[in-house]
Amino acid sequence: MPISILLALLIALVAVVFALQNATTVTIAFLAWHFDGSLALLLLLTLAVGFLIGWLAATPSLFRHRLEKKSLRKQIAKLEEHLEEERARLAVLQEQLEKENPESG
């Protein structure tokens, strides 16, 4: 089981224990809205919103890195192809040199 799944399960377990232990009702006022709910629900909702904002902030960077990685892989493939061509050319030149100068081989 990957470590990320174990970590997610651990966080979920901690969140459930936290919610069970913090069932106190609080009133939240924001501008014209008023909300009555449990403290645990409010804090877990805040955690979820923070996670979402962080994920959205990181998404452009992730896409940019993926595109850069793809571009670099293409460049590596081209360079490897060029290297093979140069090795073949070198082998041909070495054969020609050996034919012209058999005593130096």
Image (cartoon, rainbow, N blue to C red):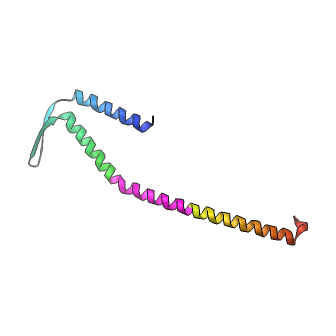
Give how far across and how far down residue 28 sits, in percent.
13, 41
Horizontal side of residue 42 vs 65, given as left or right: left
Give how far across and how far down residue 35 sits, in percent.
12, 40
The residue at 74%/67% (across/down) is 90
Q: Quadrant of the C terminus?
A: bottom right
The residue at 85%/68% (across/down) is 98
Residue lying furthest bottom in this view? 100
Q: Is residue 96 above or below residue 46?
A: below
Q: Nearer the viewer, residue 78 or 7?
A: 78
Residue 40 in magenta? no
How many callouts does the rendering have? 0
Instruction: Report the magenta residues as a range.
Output: 57-75
Residue 58 in magenta? yes
Horizontal side of residue 55 vs 76, given as left or right: left
The residue at 81%/71% (across/down) is 96
Q: Is residue 47 above or below residue 98?
A: above
Give how far across and how far down residue 11 sits, in percent.
34, 34
Q: Quadrant of the N terminus?
A: top left
Q: Quadrant of residue 64?
A: bottom left
Q: Main secondary structure of the magenta part?
A: helix
The residue at 72%/65% (across/down) is 88
